[in-house]
Image (cartoon, rainbow, N blue to C red):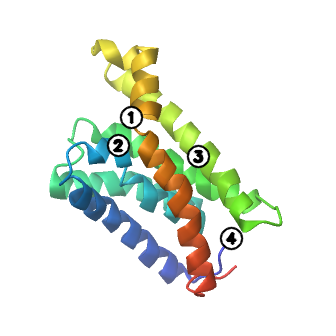
């Protein structure tokens, strides 16, 4: 867990929530980039890993909500699903990073990041199946795997590469401290 004041935790969380609205705006200029590169996922995962699970949970809930209200992305019909999925990312990443105790900071980050990403996708898919039962593809396993793992593979890779690099860079620059 990183040492920081409560005020700093709220400010960093607010920044992550804001990034959930700004990053999609930048990437949606490229067709299909939003569903492929997953721009909201990065700030939520960073928030959970750096600030802690309650704040990662808040960023996961309020980030898509703010983005939906201010930019129209995601559409209001899909915002609840994204809120559930991203809330799981922020919460699980923040919970696991607290208990990960290896000698390698990179290992600790991946130990928290990978289960959060998998669990978030599974729960997001389940939420979609429950909330959109009339849609035939919502409960179809092939659609779920394609949408949540194959189409988003570039975004998953970006997250796995970029998030540890950002955290280590923030530590080395002493912007966050253990």
Question: Residue 177 location, x and y as percent?
Answer: 65, 82
The residue carrying mark 4 is: 1
Report how far apart the C-alphas of labels 3 and 4 lie in the structure.
17 Å
**Do residues under tags 3 and 4 come within 8 Å of each other at their CB atoms?**
no
- Decide: few, some or many residues near mark 4? Use Cα within 10 Å; few <14, some 14-19, many ≥20: some
Report how far apart the C-alphas of labels 1 and 4 lie in the structure.
33 Å
Mark 2 or mark 4: name the one nearer the start of the chain. Answer: 4
Mark 1 or mark 3: name the one nearer the start of the chain. Answer: 3
Mark 3 or mark 4: name the one nearer the start of the chain. Answer: 4
The residue carrying mark 3 is: 116
Q: Is residue 174 above or below residue 93?
A: below
Question: Residue 147 location, x and y as percent?
Answer: 39, 29
The residue carrying mark 1 is: 151
Quadrant of the image occupied by residue 70? bottom left
**Do residues under tags 2 and 1 come within 8 Å of each other at their CB atoms?**
yes
48 to the left or right of 69: right
Mark 2 or mark 1: name the one nearer the start of the chain. Answer: 2
């Amino acid at each position: 867990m990183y040492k920081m004041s409560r005020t700093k935790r709220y400010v960093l969380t607010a920044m992550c929530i804001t990034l959930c609205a700004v990053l999609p705006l930048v990437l949606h200029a490229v067709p299909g980039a939003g569903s492929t590169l997953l721009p909201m996922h990065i700030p939520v995962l960073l928030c959970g890993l750096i600030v802690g699970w309650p704040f990662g949970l808040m960023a996961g809930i309020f980030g898509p909500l703010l983005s939906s209200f201010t930019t129209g992305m995601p559409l209001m019909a899909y915002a609840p699903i994204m809120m559930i999925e991203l809330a799981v990312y922020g919460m699980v990443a923040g919970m696991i990073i607290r208990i990960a105790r290896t000698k390698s900071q990179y290992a600790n980050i991946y130990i928290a990041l990978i289960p959060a990403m998998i669990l978030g996708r599974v729960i997001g898919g389940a939420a979609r199946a429950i909330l959109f039962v009339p849609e035939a593809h919502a409960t179809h396993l092939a659609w779920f795997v394609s949408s949540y793992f194959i189409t988003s593979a570039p975004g998953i890779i970006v997250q796995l590469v970029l998030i540890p690099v950002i955290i280590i860079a923030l530590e080395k620059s002493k912007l966050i401290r253990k």
